Image (cartoon, rainbow, N blue to C red):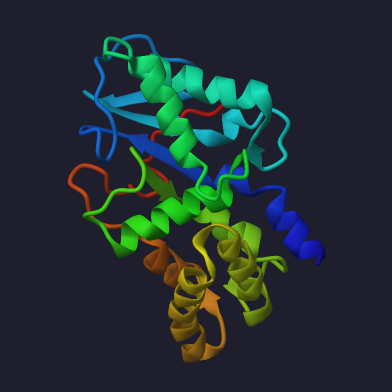
Amino acid sequence: MESLRRFTHSKMAAVTLVLLGCFSLGFSAPATTTLSTIESVDRGRYLLDTASLDLNKDGCISGTAELESFIAHVTSVLAGVPSNLLRAHSIVHRSDINKDGKICWCDFVAIHMQEKVTPNKHTAPFTVIPDTAMFEQLDADNDGQLQKAEKDHLENEFDSCLGTAEAKATVDAMDELVAKDGSISLAEYEQFMKGPSHKGTEAKPDSEKSLVKP
């Protein structure tokens, strides 16, 4: 239970969003004013470090101040786009997959997994890039492997925003990795979590990533 609490309260640091090109997958905007948590990667593409929006470090973007900050950041990127404030509100609302009034790690992973399964049906106007922090948070004993008990914690998390059927399918896919040697290594985890290949949005190695830290 302690490992589950540890995972739940630190999970927001695991997500980076790529906001890009077309509105069905992302949104385009002129390279104008950016705020501290947004970095322009190239024209119309931005990296947003969601951890910096989690002001009280409870693992979620929640409460009026944090949600308004998220909206303000997206509105800034959409500067010059008609009805940019309304679009920003819509984007933030759509990020709350399970509609519990807060945007947590599980919501972003749900978006990532849905995008992975159905890459041509975009559920959110951005791409989620998971990184090794997700693995580290699950690896409660820090042995570099996810054992079955640690994997079961992930299933509980998925169930809250993916739905039981989707959560089970995801965990079943992970079970195939576990069946090989009884655990999931970091390399296996990264391969499993690798998202769909969208031109220009591939995740770079950690040494090459350009992330804006708070």
Q: In the rendered picture of this protein, how many numbered marks are placed on residues?
A: 0
Which quarter of the rendered picture does the C terminus lie within? top right
- Tell me if I can see residue 211 in this picture: no
Depicted 76 relative to depicted 21: above or below: above
Q: Is residue 21 left or right of residue 38?
A: left
Which quarter of the rendered picture does the N terminus lie within? bottom right
Picture residue at 57% right of the left edge, 49% below the top: 105
Tell me where residue 60 sits by quadrant: top right
Q: Position of residue 109 (x, y in %)?
A: 48, 54
Q: Is residue 81 left or right of residue 140?
A: left
- Front residue of 214/84: it is 84
Picture residue at 35% right of the left edge, 16% below the top: 84
Picture residue at 25% right of the left edge, 57% below the top: 119
Depicted 162 relative to depicted 35: above or below: below
Q: Residue furthest right?
A: 2
Depicted 211 relative to depicted 89: above or below: below
Tell me where residue 188 sits by quadrant: bottom left
Q: Is residue 120 left or right of residue 117?
A: left
- Front residue of 142/166: it is 166
Picture residue at 40% right of the left edge, 44% below the top: 207
